[in-house]
Image (tube, grey):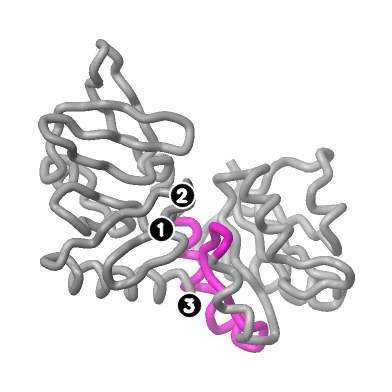
Amino acid sequence: MDLRIGICDDKPEWLEKAGDTVKRCAEQMQKKVEMYFFQNGSELLKEEHPKMHILFMDIEMPGESGIDLAMEVNRKWPECRIIYLTNYWSYAMDVYETHHVYYIVKEKFEEKLPAVLEKAIEQLRKQNRRIVFQCHGGVKANLKLDDILYFERDKRVTYVVTMEKEYTVDDKIQEIEERIAREDFVRCHTSFLVNFSYVKECTKKKMLLENGKIVDISRSYWKKTEEAYVEWVKRWAR
């Protein structure tokens, strides 16, 4: 299947230039791509075209915000990898309200594209990774790792929490951590294993998750969690 890549920008000359650059880069990576071009949110969110695998999103467009559009894309195509494009660094913190891969200043687009595109494609491959649990009640759950917000150990059971549902399993946190071996998750407490992708705010002592859950960071895990979070943010902000 061809990789569907979209570019949303209000400037036709930039669309053409960026599209040629992306196609050339994809060819060098031996990837077949279908390119789609959108000059505004109405064109992007139409039902006439298929969902995008990767979307390059301009932040500043007349009468609308690329960040608000990205939120719509997150809901409409949750598996789409969004890469922000802008002329300014001032939006670097605002974009973290959305799920995205990178934030690129346009003047660095050609230089940064190979690494960014490779990372987006790798995330597409990884997002379908699954983990299977034998849950209480005789249920066997086959879950995408990307859908899991956190794991919480309470007494003799572990809760596997997604946005839609919570599962109860016997597996210990350490056993799960060894199974997933994933850089998006961090052990921030003896009882918690958290997916950074769902962290809205992180302080030295707590993390606020997108579902409103507040997770404590225990003293023995402060340094490890802080270092892991800084590295995670660096990877997503390049």
Identify the residue position indicated by label 1 in the image. Answer: 208
Residue drawn 57% across and 62% down?
A: 97
Q: CA distance from mark 1 to mark 3?
A: 23 Å
Tell whether label 3 touches label 1 (CB within 8 Å): no
Callout 2: 10 Å neighbours few (<14), some, many (20+)? few
**Residue 193 vertical placement versus 219 (above, below):** above
Q: Is residue 136 magenta?
A: no
- Res 39 → quadrant: bottom right
Q: Nearer the viewer, residue 54 or 68?
A: 68
Kind of residue at disc 1: Leu
Question: Residue tagged by mark 3?
Answer: 238
* In the image, residue 174 above or below residue 113: above
Quadrant of the rendered structure where residue 135 is?
Answer: top left
Helix, strand or loop status at disc 2:
loop
Give how far across and how far down residue 104 sits, in percent.
59, 78
N-terminal-most mark, 2 or 3: 2
Q: Which mark is residue 212?
A: 2
The one of 208 and 176 positioned closer to us in this rendering: 208
Write down the region rendered in magenta. Answer: 97-122
Asked if labels 1 and 2 touch by Cβ distance under 8 angstroms, the answer is yes
Q: Foreground residue, 155 or 138?
A: 155
Q: Which type of secondary structure does the marked residue at label 1 adopt? A: strand
- Indicate the quadrant containing the N terminus: top left, top right, bottom left or bottom right: top right
Q: Is residue 60 left or right of residue 222?
A: right
* Left or right: 67 in relation to 144: right
Magenta stretch secondary structure, dominant? helix
Residue toward you, 49 or 91:
91
